């Protein structure tokens, strides 16, 4: 047991250190990107220069996004758990979702009954559903459908809420299903592989569970059990 505790301490220390590192890298990165934007405006910059500058900017943006996602994963904020009306919370995502080009032709059906309440940090709850919905949309070639439903499961000690996020995207192979929650596992060009790892971590710190079932060519269902 002492060994296990020591190992857990070590992992926590490495986590804190790499979060600090990610944070430190973001500052000079912002300086690089700001400077390049200014230099690109200079008269002597020709088309070829501008093309190179835009590559620098695109890649600094990508690095910044990666570091931001990594920080969310490695250094999650302490959750402020409050009762949330789930249907309303998911509706609150609509304006954000409507602005995202990945979701342009995706039909999202919020079938969560109005009486369902989960005890969760509000921002982190939004982040969970945002990640799941975007993943569903990215698994589609353009058009598709995401259905979210929920029901209360009466338990011995406490009620649990079962939530399903179901898409009719391309689905996954069995070997991918086994790896989706692994940090940095991605099958996407430009993906970070941190979305579901972060979701898993958030759900875990709220005393919940998440499971995935998927069939290649048919679609994917993410099932969450959250404290009600
Ligand atoms: P990313 O989206 O950056 O790739 P995620 O952690 O969100 O990282 O997802 C990891 C991988 O799991 C994805 O690259 C994809 O292969 C698979 N995946 C996740 N959600 C779905 C889904 N709804 N349908 C099909 N594949 C999915
Ligand atoms: Mg993702």
Image: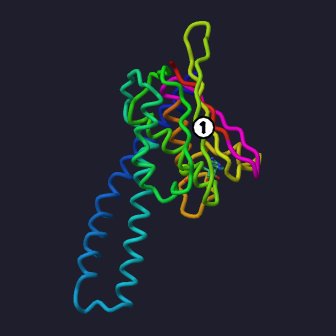
In the image, taking residue 137 as reference, residue 16 lies left or right, namely: left
Is 14 in the magenta? no
In the image, taking residue 135 as reference, residue 35 lies left or right, namely: left
Residue 81 horizontal/vertical position (percent): 39, 23
Residue at image x 52%, y 39%?
A: 199
Residue at image x 55%, y 36%?
A: 200
Residue 38 horizontal/vertical position (percent): 23, 77
Within 8 Å of ligand 1, the CB of disc 1? Answer: yes
Residue at image x 40%, y 38%?
A: 92
Q: Is residue 205 above or below residue 144?
A: above
Front position in the image: 29 or 173: 173
Q: Disc 1 on helix, strand or loop?
A: strand
Residue 142 horizontal/vertical position (percent): 60, 60
Residue under label 1: 165
Front position in the image: 152 or 179: 152
Quarter of the figure with the N terminus: top right
Which span of residues is magenta-colored? 204-220
Residue at image x 63%, y 52%?
A: 144
- Give the tally of numbered discs: 1
């Amino acid at each position: 047991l002492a060994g296990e505790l020591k190992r857990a301490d070590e992992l926590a220390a490495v986590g804190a250190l790499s979060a600090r590192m990610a944070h430190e890298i973001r500052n000079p990165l912002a300086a690089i990107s700001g400077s390049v934007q200014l230099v690109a405006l200079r008269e002597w910059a020709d088309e070829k220069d501008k093309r190179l500058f835009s590559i620098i900017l695109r890649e600094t943006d990508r690095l910044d996004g990666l570091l931001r996602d990594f920080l969310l994963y490695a250094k999650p904020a302490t959750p402020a758990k409050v009762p949330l009306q789930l249907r309303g919370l998911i509706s609150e995502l609509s304006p954000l979702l409507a602005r995202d080009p990945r979701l342009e032709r995706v039909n999202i059906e919020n079938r969560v009954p109005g009486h369902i309440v989960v005890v969760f940090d509000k921002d982190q709850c939004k982040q969970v559903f945002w990640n799941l919905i975007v993943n569903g949309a990215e698994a589609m070639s353009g058009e598709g459908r995401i259905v979210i439903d929920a029901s209360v499961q009466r338990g011995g000690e406490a009620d649990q809420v079962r939530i399903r996020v179901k898409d009719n995207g391309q689905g996954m192979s069995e070997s991918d299903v086994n790896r989706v929650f692994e940090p940095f596992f991605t099958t996407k060009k430009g993906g970070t592989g941190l979305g579901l790892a972060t979701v898993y971590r958030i759900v875990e710190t709220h005393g919940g569970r998440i499971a995935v079932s998927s069939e290649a060519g048919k679609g994917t269902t993410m099932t969450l059990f959250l404290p009600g």
